Amino acid sequence: MGLPTARGPLTERLLDVIAGAPGRGDVAAEERVPDDVLGDEDVQLALYCCYELHYRGLPGVDDAWEWDPGLLALRGRLERAFEQDVRAVAPRPERVDPSRMDDALREIVRADDGPSLSAFVEREADADQVRELLVHRSAYQLKEADPHSFALPRLWGRPKAAMVEIQVDEYGAGKPDRIHADLFAATMDELDLDPRYGAYLDVLPATTLATVNLASFFGLHRRLRAACAGHLALTEMTSSVPSRRYATGLRRLGFDTARATDFFDEHVEADAVHESIAAVDLAGGLAHQDPELGCDALFGAAALAAVEGRFAAAVDAAWADGRSSLRAAPVAAG
């Protein structure tokens, strides 16, 4: 993963500081956080870079920055603004019936009236639009399952067992060539895109980065462990049908090799199985342990729906206008 070159002033300052030795207290120098954090390119990119230190790191950046107090102070300030915006679009319910968590999650799915990118890909998207969508999704899919795995040590009992069961499949069930992130990389490669981790960071807009940052934010905070579980539950509940549509769209466009469609074909089957585990055993199990955790899980699911809805609307609007939804045209792998 390379460092982003398309930077705003906040990201520029952040990357300049962490290129040096850890321990500089001026990382958190006060700078105005914009009103629309969810749509701000600079804030979302800076937050993404902060989070990336907990994943594969940044080139030329000392790993000790991961827990540097000055950097965490800056990240915390950005997270507070981010959380405020997320809670504004996805209010947390005040009560929940633990025995009806499945229904409550399905109600969030039913309430989603945004554009369906998977239906568009299935019926009419062209090859360039499919490639563009893969570039967007690469920000998360190339680290698929990792944000949610941060929550595992913070769970116990039935919810922990449920999350482990889901995550085992995400990581290939012991088969390295079936790791879902690697299957997605193969799809990108088959469509002449660069499958390297973080290769397209420079062209991803704020609405895309926010979808990934949301998962990292939930996963990295113990107080939000149930929100992370709800995020995962809704992800599993809304994956099987769209994956089938994406696979159909790829085949319609002539991308009918296993390398092109395996990622989506795998999710059609796996997530159909995961759906009940995620809703009943994971989210429902948390609600039975503590109804407050159930409310947090529903908040996490609603937050996913809202932030993903903003992303889908932005892509749909760009395509309706005949323009790219990326910040710049991606470069093919060649």
Image: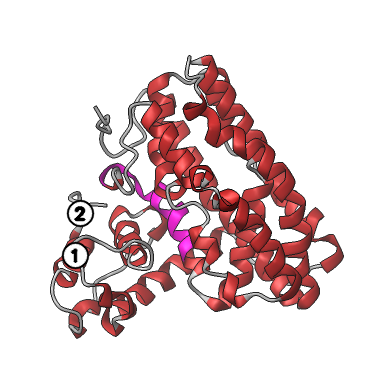
Locate residue 190, reporting x and y percent: 40, 27
Of tags 1 and 2, the one toward the viewer is: 1
Where is mark 2, residue-wise? 7
Q: Quadrant of residue 22?
A: bottom left
Q: Residue at x 37, y 34 (%)?
A: 325
Name above or below for residue 157 compared with residue 271: below
* Direction front: furthest residue: 175
What kind of residue is marked 1?
Answer: Leu
Secondary structure under badge 1?
helix
Residue 227 located left or right of residue 47: right
Q: Residues within 10 Å of mark 2 (few under 14, many from 20)?
A: some
Q: Residues within 10 Å of mark 1 (few under 14, many from 20)?
A: many
Where is mark 1, residue-wise? 15
Residue 305 located left or right of residue 134: right
Q: CA distance from mark 1 to mark 2?
A: 9 Å
Secondary structure under badge 2?
loop
